[in-house]
Image: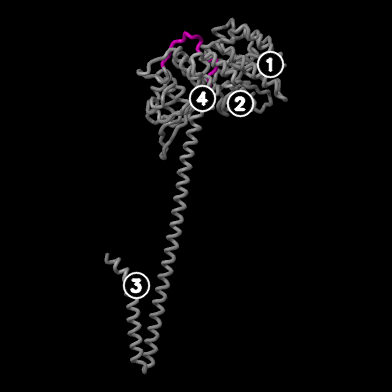
């Protein structure tokens, strides 16, 4: 308080002091006007005092102006920084919303697992895969979400990623009623500022193929991937009926499935099958993949709609649609390379369809396409369980000039003697063997053995699920003829 009073009267006190000193000096000069030395001395003091006060006042004014300018500059800087902060916050919010929108429309399943093995984030694809609401997933252990049977197959990988190791692998997940998903999985560890692992992202892509489907409707119900005692187990009919209603909104799913095919709701993709070495200049081939477009514009993975098509007996219809569209597209290409082959997976029901070879022959003739443009993939499981129908199917499609590939080779203990009489052109080595061949000597020896015997019987080899340059290099050293996988090329729309 005293300081404030002093500052408020200081100006007046200084003025009074100056006036008093000036008065005293003037009076002294007046009384000593006859004494010139004293007059000059006192006049000098008076002038010096006035100049000193003028300098002090000028300096105070300059300091005040400088402080005012500094304050103004700081105010402008603060306003600028405040504006930048508001813009940054708005951009963060916009980016977060945009990333969330993208995340929710991806077909890839994304899950964040913390250091305790609990689910801390998941996207729409993962929720739909489990058929669970968000509140039934958040905060639950990954072991419960997958079920003990499925979790046992990935437990080691989970422990390794919680230890900071990035992984890529493939595994099969069987849903209630026998619906099977083949997943290509990546683990991306997350670290804090100190370098400690705080969890990892679980990224899963559905790469289900027809050969992964259950062999019959009598498959036993397995533990639900989201298994818990409260949720129980659904049988195959209930699972497919629920999915049918989700797909069409009605119970007559077969008719709706056909309408979806005819309405253009299915799209074809292709993935490069590259010759080895990659720069050899040899002819490349392509595998045809199929996806279904959902209402939101995202892609429904094949593992979701294949069981419904199997149940409805529509797999031959779907296979014919694929064959017809692939041949029609290839026939309309002005500079197509007729030596390239399109690999198409065929379902077990198609293998046993006696009318399919006739459809194939008439379609090839109608479009003027050589049979060598197509290679039909028969799964190792179908060859083992349906040997008679598979042999007849292979004989008839080869009679049309088409080629045949045996997919999933090496997954089971199929002997070469069993396939010698089937006249296949390609052996597609199962990806579960390829992906571990650099770290597992047994898998590496299996790949080498398959390639050696394949060359003796005149069959080309194709390595599936090739994910890295190191695997590509090793496959080239072994002598594998072709490679397929994300390390070679990702799937793209047919024609793009």
Residue placed at 33% from the left, 88% from the top?
A: 28
Q: Is residue 64 above or below residue 206?
A: below
Please, what secondary structure does the residue beneath circle 4 have? strand
In this view, the mark in front (3 or 4):
3
Q: Are marks 2 and 1 in contact (CB under 8 Å)?
A: no
Left or right: 372 as drawn, with respect to 437: right
> Spatial distance from mark 2 to mark 3, Cα to Cα?
84 Å
Q: How is the image coloured?
A: one colour
In the picture, the disc for residue 372 is 1
In this view, the mark in front (1 or 3):
3
Q: Position of residue 270 (x, y in %)?
A: 61, 23
> Spatial distance from mark 4 to mark 2, Cα to Cα?
17 Å
Residue position for label 4: 205
Crowding near pointer 4: few (<14 within 10 Å), some, many (20+)?
A: some
Residue position for label 3: 11
In the picture, the disc for residue 493 is 2
In this view, the mark in front (2 or 3):
3
Magenta-highlighted residues: 207-223
Q: Is residue 441 visible?
A: yes
Q: Earlier in the sequence, mark 1 or mark 4?
A: 4
């Amino acid at each position: 308080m005293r300081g404030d009073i002093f500052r408020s009267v200081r100006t007046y006190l200084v003025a009074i002091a100056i006036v008093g000193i000036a008065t005293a000096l003037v009076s002294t000069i007046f009384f000593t006007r006859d004494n010139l030395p004293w007059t000059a001395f006192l006049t000098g003091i008076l002038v010096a005092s006035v100049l000193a006060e003028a300098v002090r006042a000028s300096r105070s004014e300059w300091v005040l102006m400088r402080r005012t300018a500094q304050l103004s500059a700081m105010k402008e800087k603060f306003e600028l920084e405040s504006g930048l902060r508001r813009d940054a916050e708005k951009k963060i919010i916009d980016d977060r919303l945009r990333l969330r929108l993208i995340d929710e429309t991806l077909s890839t399943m994304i899950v964040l697992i913390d250091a305790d093995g609990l689910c801390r984030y998941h996207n729409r694809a993962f929720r739909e895969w489990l058929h669970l609401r968000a509140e039934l997933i958040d905060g639950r252990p990954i072991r419960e979400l997958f079920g003990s049977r499925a979790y046992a197959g990935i437990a080691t990988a989970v422990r390794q990623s919680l230890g900071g190791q990035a992984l890529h692998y493939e595994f099969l997940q069987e849903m209630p009623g026998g619906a099977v998903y083949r997943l290509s999985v990546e683990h991306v560890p997350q670290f804090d500022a100190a370098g400690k692992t705080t969890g990892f992202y679980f990224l899963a892509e559905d790469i289900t193929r027809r050969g992964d489907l259950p062999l019959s409707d009598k498959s036993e119900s397995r533990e639900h991937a989201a298994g818990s005692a409260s949720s129980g187990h659904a049988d195959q009919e209930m699972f497919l009926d629920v999915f049918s209603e989700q797909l069409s909104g009605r119970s007559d799913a077969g008719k709706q499935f056909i309408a979806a095919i005819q309405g253009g709701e299915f799209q074809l993709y292709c993935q490069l099958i590259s010759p080895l070495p990659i720069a050899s200049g040899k002819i490349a081939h392509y595998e045809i993949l199929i996806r279904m477009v959902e209402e939101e514009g995202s892609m429904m993975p094949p593992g979701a709609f294949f069981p419904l098509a199997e149940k409805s007996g529509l797999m031959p219809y779907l296979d014919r649609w694929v064959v017809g569209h692939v041949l029609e597209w290839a026939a309309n290409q002005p500079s197509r390379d007729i030596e390239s082959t399109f690999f198409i997976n065929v379902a077990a029901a198609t293998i046993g369809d006696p009318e399919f070879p006739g459809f194939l022959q008439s379609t090839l003739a109608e479009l003027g396409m050589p049979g060598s443009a197509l290679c039909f993939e028969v799964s190792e499981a179908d060859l083992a369980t349906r040997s008679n129908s598979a042999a007849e199917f292979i004989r008839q499609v080869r009679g049309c000039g088409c080629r045949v590939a045996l997919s999933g080779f090496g997954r089971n203990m199929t002997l070469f003697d069993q396939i010698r009489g089937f006249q296949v052109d390609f052996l597609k080595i199962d990806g579960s063997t390829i992906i571990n061949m650099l770290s597992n000597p047994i898998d590496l020896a299996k790949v080498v053995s398959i390639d050696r015997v394949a060359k003796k019987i005149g069959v080309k080899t194709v390595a599936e699920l090739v994910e890295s340059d190191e695997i590509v290099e090793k496959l080239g050293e072994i002598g594998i003829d072709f490679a397929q996988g994300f390390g070679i090329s990702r799937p793209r729309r047919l024609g793009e």
